[in-house]
Image (cartoon, rainbow, N blue to C red):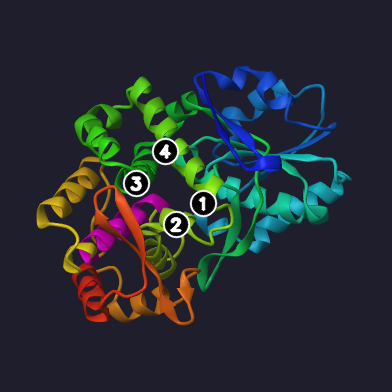
Amino acid sequence: MKTLNLDLQEKSYPIYIGQDLLSEGGLLTKHISDKQVMIVTNTTVAPLYLQRVQNLLSSFELAQVVLPDGEKYKTLGTLNCIFSALLENRFDRSCTLIALGGGVVGDMTGFAAASYQRGVNFIQIPTTLLSQVDSSVGGKTGVNHVLGKNMIGAFHQPKCVLIDIDTLDTLDNQQYSAGMAEVIKYGLLGHSNFFNFLQKNIKDLMDRNKPLVAEIIYQSCQHKANIVAQDELEVGKRALLNFGHTFGHAIENTLGYGTFLHGEAISVGMLMAVKLSQLEGYLSSNQVAQVQYLLEKANLPISIIGKISVSDFMKAISVDKKVINGNIRLILLKKLGHAFVCDHYKNQLLNQVINEFCQ
């Protein structure tokens, strides 16, 4: 097992990464301050891992809520199921919520924990690659709205993140590929060594070589933890983690949540950002080709041609958390491994990219 620490002073917490961690009850119990524990999971994960987690916590006053599975259920209506379960079981402000599942479960559980009685503790046990490398770390929580993704939420840090890579054994190939999109994001944001590592090992990674999978999870979490420690509330550097997400969220919103998995939408969104970076004069055509090749080897989509009209895409992209005073802030690359916040791109080049990817 490897342990990372996300340093946020009094809100600091460990990220445990390893195999068979769902057999290590002590990793969880030392982060639970009182007797009431609510496990939040979904209909896919519950039959696989709920009983194992319950067995670790047999000495606590346990309850659980099993949500429907899918991005389309990441709504205020579904969130209310968690609140109802907490109230029906008379859970108080000393309780702890445990998110057992992927990014949707983690985001909604964290938001419920941030809101219930104005804030209670929670723990992340992510079971998908995407949630293990990205969404479980950093304290972003929330739900979607029909007009925009993740527009309703809060920053609320967990007490710990427990990543058992053995849970990936039950993850289907499409979901695994979707998680690789966020891994590739860190290769593009972080340093060229990690991008080169991904290029060199992409076949073995897609074959789920466990030592290599553990390494990419560790590297991704370490990169995110370093950024979040400097900018918890996304007023500066943390915005870089949204690379490809403004485009990707517009794709999800326009197609309907769940039509593309989040990682699939981010794959196309990153390639759009890379292409705009090329048109702005930062990247070469060869670098764009390298990124596209890596995405394709990870079995990720690289286009939305025929799926979204240009006008619908433009409407969706204007409703985003990164819109400041009516201006769409984008994350671009000056080179592979060096991202920056860009407010002054050429609108005609943005339109060119959107046309290229939509038509």
Residue 282 placement (x, y as % from top left): 19, 61
Q: Position of residue 76 (x, y in %)?
A: 66, 63
Q: Which residue is mark 4?
A: 220
Q: CA distance from mark 1 to mark 2?
A: 6 Å
Between 178 and 173, the one lying in front of the other is 178
Residue 101 drawn at (x, y percent): 56, 39
Q: Earlier in the sequence, mark 2 or mark 3?
A: 3
Q: Is residue 132 left or right of residue 338?
A: right
Q: Is residue 65 visible?
A: no
Residue lying at 22% horizontally and 81% vertically, measured from the top left? 348
Residue at mark 1 to residue at mark 3: CA–CA distance? 18 Å
Labels 2 & 3 near each other (Cβ < 8 A) = no
- Which mark is first along the chain, 2 or 1? 1
**Residue that appears at 39% across and 36% down:** 172
What mark, if any, has residue 258 been given in the picture?
A: 2
Residue under label 3:
181
Find disc 1 in the rendering and name its residue. Answer: 70
